[in-house]
Amino acid sequence: MRICLFPGTFDPLTLGHVDIITRALPLFDKIVVGIGINTSKAPMFSPEKRLGWVKAIFKNESKVEGAVYEGLTVNFCKKIGAKFILRGIRYVSDFEYEKTIADANRTLDKSIETIFLTGEPKYTSVASTIVRDIIKNGGDASHFLPPEVAKTL
C-alpha cells in the first residue's frame, strides 16, 4: 500500500492545499494530511479545528484522512507506515527550502521519498500567511479558502 504523508501547519487549509491533495490522489492508496504541531509557531487556529477542516473537505474521499502529530516528520511517517512525503511547490524559492528539508529527511531515513507537486498557477499566490493576515485585518479571505473553511471563520 502506497501511503503518503502531506505534512504542514494548514493554518488555515487553503485552496492551494486542496489542489495538491486532490491532484496527488491518483498517485497514492492513502494520503494522510498531517497537521504538524510546531512549538516555534503560534497558530491562529487550533489543531482540532484544522483537523475538522480536513475531515469536512474530504468526507467523501476514503483515501484521505487527517492526523495531528508532534516531532520529526520521518518518525510520524514510520508510525503510520508512509513511505512518501508530499510537498507543494509554488515558487523556485519554495523548492530551495523544501529540498533542504527533503535532504535532511533522507539522511534520517533513506526509505522515505519526498514527492514535489507544483501548484496550479491560479493558486500560486495563496499562502496561509497572507490568508491569516487578511483574516486578522477583517478582510474577506473566502477567495482563497474551501467553503468548509470559510464558513467557519
Image (tube, grey):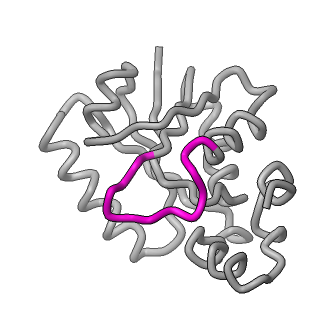
Q: Is residue 138 left or right of residue 54?
A: right
Residue occupying the far top of the picture? 1
Q: Quadrant of residue 75?
A: top left
Task: Work out whether residue 111 or residue 131 is closer to the camera in this orientation and state it.
Answer: 131
Q: Is residue 3 left or right of residue 75?
A: right
Q: Measured from the top left, where is residue 77 in percent x and y?
A: 34, 30
Q: Which residues are magenta?
A: 36-48
Q: Image quarter for residue 66?
A: top right
Decide whether residue 40 is among the magenta residues.
yes
Which residue is depicted at the point 62% across and 40% down? 51
Q: How many marks?
A: 0
Q: Nearer the viewer, residue 100 or 139?
A: 139
- Taking 36 as reference, is 60 above or below it? above
List the single residue furthest toward the left.
107
From the top left corner, tell me how far across and down residue 76 is, in percent. Answer: 33, 31
Q: Magenta segment: does it hold 90?
A: no
Q: Is residue 88 above or below residue 108?
A: below
- Quadrant where the C terminus lies? bottom right
Query: Which quadrant of the structure image shows residue 7?
Result: top left
Residue at 42% across, 46% down: 36
The chief SS type of the magenta part is loop
Who's the residue at 42% across and 45% down the image?
115
Q: Residue at (63%, 59%) from the top-left corner?
A: 12
Residue 57 lies, in percent from the top left, at: 77, 40
Is residue 53 positioned above or below 140 on the image? above
* Image coordinates for residue 35, horizontal then vertical, percent: 49, 44
Q: Considering depth in this image, is 94 or 55 the residue closer to the camera?
A: 55
